[in-house]
Image (spheres, rainbow, N blue to C red):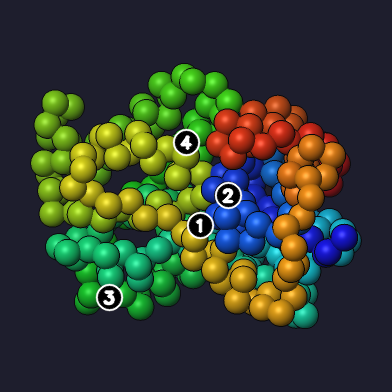
Amino acid sequence: MARPIGIFDSGIGGLSILKALRAELPGEHFIYIADSGHAPYGERDDAHVVERSLKMAADLTGRNIKALVVACNTATAAAIDVLRATYPQLPIVGVEPALKPAVATSVTQHIAVMATRSTLASARFAALLAAQQGQASFVLLPCDGLAEAIEQAAGHSDATQVIAACARILGSAGFFEDQNEPFQALKRVDTLVLGCTHYPFAAQHIAALLGPDVTLLDTGAAVALQTRRLLAGNLSDQPLRDISGIQGVEWFSTGQPDALVAAAQAWLGLKADAQMLFI
């Protein structure tokens, strides 16, 4: 069997990255770890996130991975430099809010960014924002509780809490003058960056709240392309046969795996025979 590509996130949000990776690299085998027992990363300090990221990487490198994808904006911001220093020979791909693509996409050059407080407060995000200085105006939206609401809604049809969290976050920023006239106060914003890998799974609700004039951007496709570039010449040539009915993915969770199993089925159409990890 070809060496796998390892992926980790604080929970199930990284499934948005896995989806893009499987589309770009259909012949590859993947190992996905949800660090649900130590989530949410987005509301923890950097020391916690670095410690957990190193433990995830240690487990995955012990499984002979050929590349590591940090499928979490918060972990990328806090820990990717440490991970690259620790594993200098391993290709490591992180995720960052798509500010540069947003500048290229926006007509009005007024852009909103939804992300966790940890991501928005990080030095890495500050550098990313500074690189776009003078090219656009950015509205930064800390999204307390949204990732957790998405996790809790995984695998069932009740999106009430997700919708409420999205409405609260957008409303507190001034997007709504009232609930019947969305997108008045910040009507020049025409592009919104989904700066957490969980948020694409709330995209339909965000789009419904903001209306059709706002383009939503995430980073899944860009991460998949970068992974392909780093592994050029080291990719499987043939599509991988299904392994034990789980279609080329091994699944692990440091918490109860029910949410991961449900989300993999609901969002990716995959059967996730997830195992618990005690790390």
Specify the quadrant that holds the N terminus.
bottom right
Label 4 and label 2: CA atoms lie apart by 23 Å
Label 2, on which residue? 19
Q: CA distance from mark 4 to mark 3?
A: 29 Å
**What separation in Å lies between label 2 and label 3 (alpha carbons)?**
32 Å
Mark 1–mark 3 Cα distance, whole angstroms, equals: 24 Å
Q: In the picture provided, is 232 more to the left or to the right than 4? A: left
Q: Nearer the viewer, mark 1 or mark 3?
A: 1
- Residue 262 image position (x, y, % from top left): 64, 28
Q: Residue at x 35, y 68 (%)?
A: 101
Q: What x and y, as percent, mark residue 67?
A: 73, 68
**What amino acid is found at the position of numbered circle 2 in the picture?**
Lys
Residue at label 1? 220
Indicate the position of residue 238 as horizontal and vertical percent values.
74, 63
Name the residue located 51 percent from the left edge and 57 percent from the top edge: 220
- The kind of residue on which mark 3 rests is Gln
Left or right of 113 on screen, residue 237 = right
- Residue at mark 3: 133
Residue at screen point 29% across, 40% down: 207
User: Quadrant location of residue 36?
Assistant: top right
Helix or strand or loop: what does disc 3 sit on? loop
